[in-house]
Amino acid sequence: MTPSIACPVKCRPHPRLAPQPPAPSLELLAARGAPAAGELRASRSPPYLSLSRSADSFESRAPCLGSASARRARAAVALGGDGQSAALIAGAQSRHAIFSDELVRRAFAAAEAAHRGQVRASGDPYLQHCVETAALLAELGAGPAVVAAGLLHDTVDDAGLGYGFISEHFGAGVADLVKGVSKLSHLSKLARRNDTASRIDEADRLRIIFLAMEDARAVLIKLADRLHNMRTLDSLPKNKQQSFAKETLEIFAPLANQLGILNWKEQLENLCFKYLCPDKFDELSTSLTEFYNRDLIAAATRRLEQALQVRGLSYYAIYGRHKSLYSIYSKMARKKLVMDEIYDIHGVRVILENKADCFAALEIIHHLWPRIPGKFKDYINSPKPNRYQSLHTVVLTEETLPLEIQIRTRDMHLQAEFGIAAHWRYKEVAARSCCTSVSEMVEWVRWVITWHCQTLNTDHPSSLARDASSKETHTIPSHSDACLSSYSKQCDHKGPVLVILLENEKMSVQEIPQHWTIVDLLNRSSNSGMPLRLRLNSHVVHNWNQELKMGDVLELIPSTPCKCRGYTREFHQKFDHRLAVSQS
């Protein structure tokens, strides 16, 4: 299990934190007919902006303008924007062609009008955050609806736009995505204020609920929103940086891992490491710079290229890599090691055409260098739970330093980089799957939820989130006509049901047996003997005997007048502006 970080926070920026640009050798992929390097790996992070208050942050900014924002947005959609943010949209279009799509351009115009006058703590326009969130989704290969929802994801909570407005102008699909992101943001805010991240089992359950209650694409938008917020955390006070980073490390980074988006997972972990333990971050960063032997990587790459050419084995790319900083820290802490005892700091990745070529390349590698016993892992025949596939072997170089070599196909590489969103990368080859990309996502998410729910009562309930290197073989569901069925937010598993309970200014994630009703849960609650008003998923409850389903949110409100404080009052105002009706 990945160790949690507990150390004084003395945050300061560090130049080595910024994500590295794609390895130059990835350009070989484009030269050999593979996707361009920019498609295979996320591009470099944008310039740092500061984080302002949204449903997912704390910083104050200009007040929301409510109906005025809606009127401006309506006019902007009709007129195509007012031209004030031409440079911003032009910059986005230069990076990603999808920003020229008609739906995306209209979403940009509406977001610009809705957020006009709102600024981040640094003084930068809030719209910048919306654009960068959408750009992260574009880098994954998302379509117009998802990118448009990324642009609009904060307009409901922070600019007063309604579901009806978004549905009318952009369609119910985009409106549902924005609504889903809003719900996830509010639950995230409640979890942060209740310090859910400190309770490991409860954090695990919250991640399952995130997957179970919303469209998988809404979860991806929320992850993109969080990644950009983490990149722009410098302007917040240190205590808020720590709170935000702690929640991200325990909930959102493992969520990215569960969905197989390892690129985002590593960025989130390194950013959290920077803010939670900056002294250790600086120390390890300096040590890695001194320890990492670029000449070793260059020599190994040349030798392997020559050997593959002699055998007539074509490849898309061979390039060097090093283990992420947080992964090094975690392994050192977990196994009580020093840096030179970690075998996979130096690495080379080989991307080939097919599975047979991967095993042929493995044979060549073991002829070039002596292998280190016990360090071979076949994730091709035994994929990780997040569908990661690759061959890993560790060999001993001429410098007597261990070198990890990862061998995978191009499709496996896309899966490793983009996880659940890799299906968007396969759009140009229609025959690859019998399912739409959305249906494939649904099937995978259902499987992840089912598998994870079945582990809740084991000795290691958080193994999926904490250590994706499990050696157990897992059967990944194949894509068939069955996954063309309409999307349901409930997973078909036989394990426990997870619901969120709001009571006495506190939020908890409750695990209950199947078929439990509201009454059953109330009998277990500390408020079982009190007169209560209830809301289930923001609606007043009239039937206390209805069954609870995965992801339900049950709110317990004392019938006697009370002074609601803080986030409970905000929750009431957000989801129910009418007086609740007491249960008779």
Image: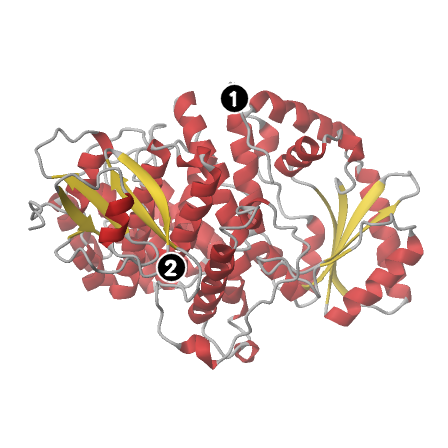
Vertical arrangement, residue 282 with respect to residue 430, above or below: above
Most foreground residue, 408 or 99? 408
Most foreground residue, 578 or 63? 578
Give the residue at x 62% y 35%: 326
Most foreground residue, 197 or 283? 197
Residue 156 at least partly seen: yes
Vertical arrangement, residue 95 with respect to residue 144, above or below: above
Residue 53 location (% of width, % of height): 30, 33
Amino acid carrying label 2: it is: Val
Placement of the N terminus among the 4 image quadrants: top right
Give the residue at x 80% y 54%: 376
Using the rendered view, name the quadrant where residue 387 is placed.
bottom right
Q: Residues within 10 Å of mark 2 (few under 14, many from 20)?
A: many
- First reached walking from the N terminus: tag 2 or tag 1: 1
Residue 38 at least partly seen: no
Residue 189 location (% of width, % of height): 32, 38
Residue 156 location (% of width, % of height): 23, 48
Where does label 1 land, which residue?
12
Q: Residues within 10 Å of mark 1 (few under 14, many from 20)?
A: few
Where does label 2 land, which residue?
146
- Total numbered circles: 2
